[in-house]
């Protein structure tokens, strides 16, 4: 039997029930907002008046408790320091105090300068009180060969010969019209029409320094050789046109060989007129031939005693030959000294009135050894303290020194550049360290020229324009030859005057002759390094350099 339940429709809402019981009391609510302020109340009645007339003390205390002063309170802490006020005006100067007691005697002062000290200072400052050598009135004309065969180095030696010789001849005439003193002229000659002269009557040549400056400015012509025409030019232009009464007239002619065949041989005796005393100097082995020897005799007016022959131009500046020329040109000098408290002997310092830049090229190879290296340092120190150094960096005269030590191809040490400061020189030498390396002189020469001659810009350590640039090589005579050809060409290009000090028995003469530019007279041999400090060796080398 199947039962089926079916849900009927929703019935109507029933009757509302009775209310339930009340719940428990709730918590106290928060305080409500304050109401508005009420109006101000009326003023109350006044209290009793305190009066000192009250007799009852207890009443007085009760009624007027503040009528009596209490005990003193505790002192408070100090306040902060205030800012200082403005400075007041200075007061009036007070009256002077009483004099103090006399002080005791102080220590004795240094002694004052003596007359000798004063005159020494004057002489060193201006040279105006030195003794003077006077040869009487002299007119001297030097005729020097400037042809291509001479070469720049030998032309420089010719000019140095002229300067060194004139330095020995005393006072230069301050006025070309003066009847006293020496007047000096110079003619340099090459091919026809290229003669240049420093005139006897040039008013600008009024001192030894001005003459040297004029000679230094002469530049090598490098042309042909027109000797006869040059002699005629010298006589007509310098001697004949500028004769002085009572003056001795000398001519010194320098040539290296045969003159151009197109020139007139009859002019060789152009100087043999009047009272001109002619000295002819022939340099080179060609004068051993009779024909060329006769040329020299013709120049010297057939006076055999007035002809000198030499193999090398370096012999011109040798001390012995300068002495000989001094004797020929000024045989009876008169030494005139001012009447001074302290008299000194006549001193001639050839480097005083010409600029010389001296670069020592020191071989720092291991063959030298540390002991010999110290000898080299002492030698350069001795030169530095003997040379007349320039007075300042702007001084265009006197000497400056530089030192370059070299080792292998890439090892060069410029100890110090060209300097006139003796303190700097000596301190730098004392701090110089020995390289103890190999030896390559060619790269050292190139380095020296680049850093001391070709250095860009104006620097006081670079060579001075117009100065004689001298390289002094100190070596044991053995060196690598790499770059040597380039170095020698650079020396010639920059007019470097070389001097070579070769020490020891084993030397490479081929290398020495190359760095000496072929001049054997420029090579000084020493048995060992101690010998270069000996007075005989040092003095001979010093005279060559200066």
Image: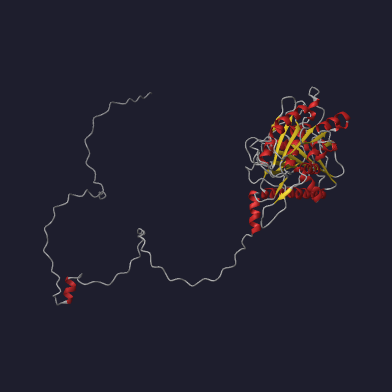
Q: Is residue 363 visible?
A: no
Please name whichever residue, 162 or 131, is drawn nearer the observer in this view of the structure. 131
Q: Where residue 435 sits: x, y (%)?
A: 76, 44
On screen, 39 above or below 471?
below
Which color scheme does this rendered protein use?
secondary structure
**Horizontal side of residue 61 vs 193, given as left or right:** left
On screen, 58 above or below 525?
below
Residue lying at the far top in this picture: please name it: 262
Please name whichever residue, 267 or 344, is drawn nearer the observer in this view of the structure. 267
**Horizontal side of residue 133 vs 260, given as left or right:** left
Q: Quadrant of residue 70?
A: bottom left
Task: Give the quarter of the figure containing the N terminus.
Answer: top left
Q: Is residue 124 visible?
A: yes
Q: Residue at x 42, y 69 (%)?
A: 97
Please name whichever residue, 424 or 15, is drawn nearer the observer in this view of the structure. 424
Q: Where residue 206 sits: x, y (%)?
A: 65, 40
Q: Quadrant of residue 313?
A: top right
């Amino acid at each position: 039997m199947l039962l089926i339940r079916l849900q009927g429709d929703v019935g109507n809402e029933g009757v509302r029930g009775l209310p339930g019981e009340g719940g428990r009391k709730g918590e106290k609510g928060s305080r409500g907002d304050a109401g508005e302020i009420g109006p101000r109340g009326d003023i109350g009645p006044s209290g009793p008046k305190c009066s000192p007339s009250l007799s009852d003390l207890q009443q007085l205390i009760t009624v007027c408790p503040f009528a009596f002063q209490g005990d003193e309170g505790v002192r408070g802490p100090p306040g902060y320091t205030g800012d200082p006020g403005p400075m007041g005006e200075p007061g009036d100067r007070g009256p002077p105090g009483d004099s103090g007691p006399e002080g005791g005697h102080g220590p004795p002062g240094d002694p004052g300068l003596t007359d000798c000290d004063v005159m020494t200072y004057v002489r060193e400052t201006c040279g105006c009180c030195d003794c003077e050598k006077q040869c009487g009135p002299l007119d001297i004309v030097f005729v020097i060969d400037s042809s291509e065969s001479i070469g720049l180095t030998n032309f420089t030696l010719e000019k140095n010969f002229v300067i060194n010789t004139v330095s020995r001849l005393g006072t230069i005439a301050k006025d070309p019209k003066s009847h006293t003193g020496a007047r000096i002229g110079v003619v340099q000659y090459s091919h026809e029409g290229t003669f240049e002269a420093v005139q006897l009557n040039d008013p600008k040549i009024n001192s030894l320094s001005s003459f040297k400056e004029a000679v230094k400015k002469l530049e090598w012509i490098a042309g042909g050789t027109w000797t006869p025409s040059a002699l005629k030019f010298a006589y007509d232009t310098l001697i004949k046109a500028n004769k002085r009464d009572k003056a001795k007239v000398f001519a010194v002619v320098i040539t290296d060989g045969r003159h151009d065949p197109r020139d007139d041989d009859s002019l060789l005796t152009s100087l043999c007129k009047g009272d001109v005393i002619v000295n002819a100097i022939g340099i080179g082995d060609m004068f051993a031939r009779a024909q060329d020897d006769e040329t020299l005799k013709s120049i010297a007016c057939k006076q055999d005693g007035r002809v000198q022959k030499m193999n090398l131009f370096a012999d011109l500046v040798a001390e012995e030959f300068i002495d000989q020329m001094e004797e020929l040109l000024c045989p009876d000098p008169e030494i005139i000294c001012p009447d001074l408290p302290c008299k000194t002997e006549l001193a001639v310092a050839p480097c005083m009135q010409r600029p010389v830049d001296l670069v020592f090229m020191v071989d720092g190879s291991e063959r030298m050894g540390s002991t010999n290296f110290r000898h080299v340092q002492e030698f350069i120190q001795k030169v530095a303290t003997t040379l007349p150094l320039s007075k300042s960096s702007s001084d265009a005269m006197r000497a400056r020194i530089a030192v370059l030590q070299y080792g292998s191809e890439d090892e060069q040490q410029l100890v110090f550049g060209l300097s006139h400061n003796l303190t700097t020189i000596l301190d730098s030498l004392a701090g110089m360290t020995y390289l103890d390396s190999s030896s390559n002189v060619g790269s050292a020469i190139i380095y020296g020229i680049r850093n001391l001659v070709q250095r860009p810009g104006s620097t006081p350590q670079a060579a001075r324009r117009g100065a004689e640039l001298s390289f002094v090589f100190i070596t044991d005579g053995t060196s690598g030859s790499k770059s040597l050809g380039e170095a020698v060409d650079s020396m010639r290009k920059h007019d470097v005057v070389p001097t070579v000090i070769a020490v020891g028995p084993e030397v490479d003469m081929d290398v020495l002759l190359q760095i000496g530019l072929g001049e054997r007279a420029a090579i000084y041999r020493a048995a060992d390094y101690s010998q270069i400090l000996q007075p005989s060796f040092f003095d001979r080398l010093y005279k060559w350099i200066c």
